[in-house]
Amino acid sequence: MMIDFNRLKKEKTALREKFLTAKPFPHIVIDDFLLEGYAEKLYYSSPQPQKEHKVNDFIFTKNKFQLPNISTLSNDFEDFYHEITSDEFKSLMSYITGEDIFIDKSLYGGGLHLGDKGSYLDMHADFNYHPKETNWYRNINLLLYLNKDWKKEYGGSLKLHDSRNGDKLEIEPILNRLVIMHCRDYTLHGYDAISFPPNTYRTSVALYGYTYHDNPIYKQRSTLWAKNDNVIKNIISNIWEPAVKIKKSLFS
């Protein structure tokens, strides 16, 4: 067993209260999420990213790599995958969030995320319904950080921003820290450009929790990119949604 299920079950009531009352929006930070030594095992078995893993977005993110098939990376990653997508973990997440949650086992858009030199991810709110399972409402994001010996000067802290009232928070991406956060149209998040040491990466495992809707209750949309000081990016962000719809209609 890698996940400290015994501890999570003992603390689930307190975790639920913290999640539901957190600012700037519902989220929770769980340190020492995996039992001792297992986060290091995942860290050391994380592969070097290859060209085919690079995210094809040169506008709102830079030098970001994604490996969704984590169960094939190592025996330890395979064990982690099975535990994090288990019914036992599903039950815990549903209790903590107060929603009927299940993890997308395909890890669409998720998996192992690696940020190379100067990597950043602009502030955004994620798409709300799964592109391939249109009754799956994206309810929460889960981010397990695997940055061993992280230092503040490396950058890369997770930034949270509630676009309704301007409330903000930063969370350091330290080893064995799990962040669970609501996914809504106002739950902006991202990270600034990093300056990690050579041959090291901003490393995290991203998973997404969904709630099944018999009939979608919101209009399906793609990622929303927040306004910033870059005029060109702001122009692109305004046409992003219709551009994604056109692309989907042409190539789906």
Image (cartoon, rainbow, N blue to C red):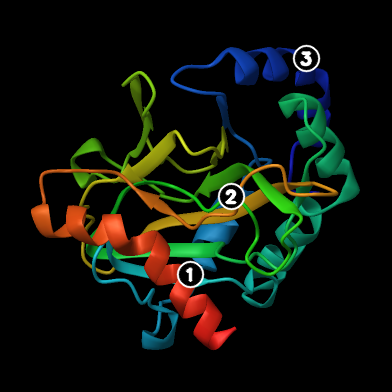
Which numbered disc, 1 or 3, marks the residue closer to the eye? 1
Name the residue at 44% across, 80% down: 53
Residue matched to label 3:
13
Position in image of residue 211 (x %, y %): 77, 44
* Horizontal arrangement in the rendering, residue 13 relative to residue 67 (left or right): right
* In the rendered image, the vertical position of residue 16 relative to residue 30, given as above or below: above
Amino acid, disc 2: Asn
Name the residue at 23% across, 62% down: 236
What separation in Å lies between label 1 and label 3 (alpha carbons)?
Answer: 41 Å
**Displayed quadrant of residue 114:** bottom left
Residue matched to label 1:
245
**What is the secondary structure assignment of the residue under circle 2?**
loop
Looking at the image, which is closer to me, 196 or 115?
115
What separation in Å lies between label 2 and label 1 (alpha carbons)?
Answer: 14 Å
Judge the density around disc 3: few (<14), some (14-19), many (≥20) Cα neighbours within 10 Å: few
Find residue 51 and name its label: none
Looking at the image, which is closer to me, 38 or 97?
97
Judge the density around disc 1: few (<14), some (14-19), many (≥20) Cα neighbours within 10 Å: few
Looking at the image, which is closer to me, 20 or 73?
20
**In this rendering, does residue 201 appear at all?**
no
Name the residue at 54% across, 68% down: 45
Q: Earlier in the sequence, mark 1 or mark 3?
A: 3
Amino acid, disc 1: Lys
What separation in Å lies between label 2 and label 3 (alpha carbons)?
Answer: 27 Å
Find residue 128 and name its label: 2
Number of numbered discs on residues: 3
**What is the secondary structure assignment of the residue under circle 1?**
helix
* In the rendered image, the vertical position of residue 31 relative to residue 150, given as above or below: above
